[in-house]
Image (cartoon, helix red, strand yellow):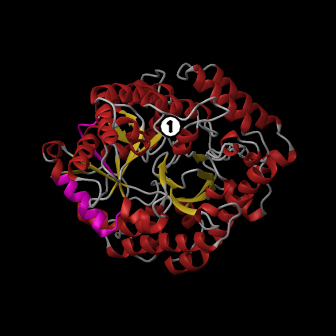
Amino acid sequence: MTRPSTFYSFEDFENGLTADTLDDFKTHVRSILTSHTLLEDQQEGALQDAAFKCMPYPKVSAKAQKAVEEEVICLLNEGPAPFHPRYTAPDYGLLLRQGSAFMDLKPAVTLYDATASLLTAYHYVPNGLPVFIGRLDELLDPYVTDMPEDQAQAVLRSFWLLVDRLYPNAFVHADIGPKATKAGCLLLQAERELKTITNVTLRYDPAVTGHDFALLAVENALQLSKPYFLNHARMVQDWGDNYVIASCYNAMRPGGGIHTLVRLNLKRLASQTRAGLEAFLDEVIPQAARLQAEVIESRIRYLVEEVGWFEKDIFLQEGLLQRDRFSAYAGIFGLAEAVQIMMERAGMPEARYGHHPAANEAAARITQRMEQEVNSLPQPYCEGTGGHACLHAQVGIDNDLGVTPGCRVPAGTEPDLYAHLLAELPSQQAVQGGISTILEFDQTAAGNPQAVLDIIHGAFSAGIRNLSIGSTNSEYIRVTGYLIRRADLEAKQKEKALRHDSSLNGTGFIAHQQNTLHRRMRTV
């Protein structure tokens, strides 16, 4: 049911809806009301989204407006005028320590108190979906250590079940690690038993995490395509110790969040010019980055200065969020296709990203130039990342056609494992806001999880930031940055309703990008 980001043009809002546009809008609303594949709460969300997208856009220049209309710059279904941040990462540790007057919660004393407080806070989270539910093992381990293990396991199992049933969405995300904890082990065990859709990241450091805990996480990943393995030591270089991972694989400050995510379609940008690689790097990218920054700024200022969200939200009033810990994402996607266009213009059509040194070098230079530009362009109210936006490898949405998510080698064309990791390595190092490389293994990996862990160690030693591990045996498919169940693909084909909201996005994405189902399988 998701519409393109420019379902209405800027002129529609400036000049009033035309009869044709109004008819389109009525048709869209009618399709929501009469849908047999949307549950009632999904219909309500779709209707809210439709009304939201009738708001006027914040003012930008004619050039920036044109870039949005031509979908070189994409607003990623945020709607014209944001009235809340895209992502928030509340300080749940503070909640457990101090309680909440608004939510009528006392400081948590027991594990029962702690899990009840967290579930309550998730209900009131400002942006409507708890995309970050905490560094859970760190939060809950103090309450677990003094309980009998079977009792703690029962509580955590019920908690994890409720998270999935109350928020059936793969953009809901928990962190564990880097230290091995009793709570972390129990959560991994509950996850293996319940097989929920909730996303998980292990902030992994071989020097700190512990071998047995890491191996348990590998075994989970081979069954469930999660947790992510995040290079904690590499993240500390860019973020310090105080960071969290939310939603797909998005880095942000705890107690902060992300105002907006505006992405740049590198494929479309390259297609609209005749530039060769050098001109693309020196002229086209800087100009596009400035337009992207202009759109980002217009949306931040609207949210902060006109809507006044930071002056009224309860989580800010109670200290669970702080405005100076927020930032914004400057997203990019379609790197592989942009590189292919550059190689064709250089008379090297056979040079493909992931397979040819010239193409890999071009990919690295494009990403690094984007990082340079994004970091050089100041943004208001982005103290969380030093007063500028943060580069992000955006995972893709269901109406992306013929364009690869983020900075990845296209699914189904991956080279040998070592070459694959080295090809994506420069982008992994340049993109601090969120990126991943997806590795899928055949059935041999289940019998040799240590070999998979060795691969992770090698990748992290080289500088890879984030790995998604999966296998042919998994019930889950890593679509781009989130998960869907294989059973949901079949249900969607039979036009059945889907309980997991993110599956609506994922099944649409796979319908357009069938190669997602045919990633290269690795043998160990």
As shown in the figure, which amino acid type bears the numbered disc 1?
Answer: Asn
Which x, y percent locates residue 107?
55, 35
Is residue 493 visible in this depiction of the protein?
Answer: no
Identified at 30% across, 63% down, the residue is 460
Q: Nearer the viewer, residue 377 or 385?
A: 385
> In the picture shown, does residue 303 fall above or below 376?
above
The image quadrant that residue 286 belongs to is bottom right
Is residue 503 visible in this depiction of the protein?
Answer: yes
The image quadrant that residue 44 belongs to is top right
Q: Nearer the viewer, residue 255 or 201?
A: 255
Write down the region rendered in magenta.
Answer: 451-474
Q: Per the image, is 477 magenta?
A: no
Which x, y percent locates residue 195?
33, 31
Q: Is residue 326 left or right of residue 81?
A: left
The residue that disc 1 covers is 505
Identified at 33% across, 75% down, the residue is 357
Q: In what quadrant of the picture does the N terminus appear?
A: top right
> In the picture shown, does residue 89 fall above or below 342?
above
Q: Nearer the viewer, residue 130 or 448?
A: 130
Which x, y percent locates residue 456?
26, 57
The image quadrant that residue 206 belongs to is bottom left
Q: Per the image, is 457 magenta?
A: yes
Identified at 42% across, 28% down, the residue is 159
Label 1: state its secondary structure: helix
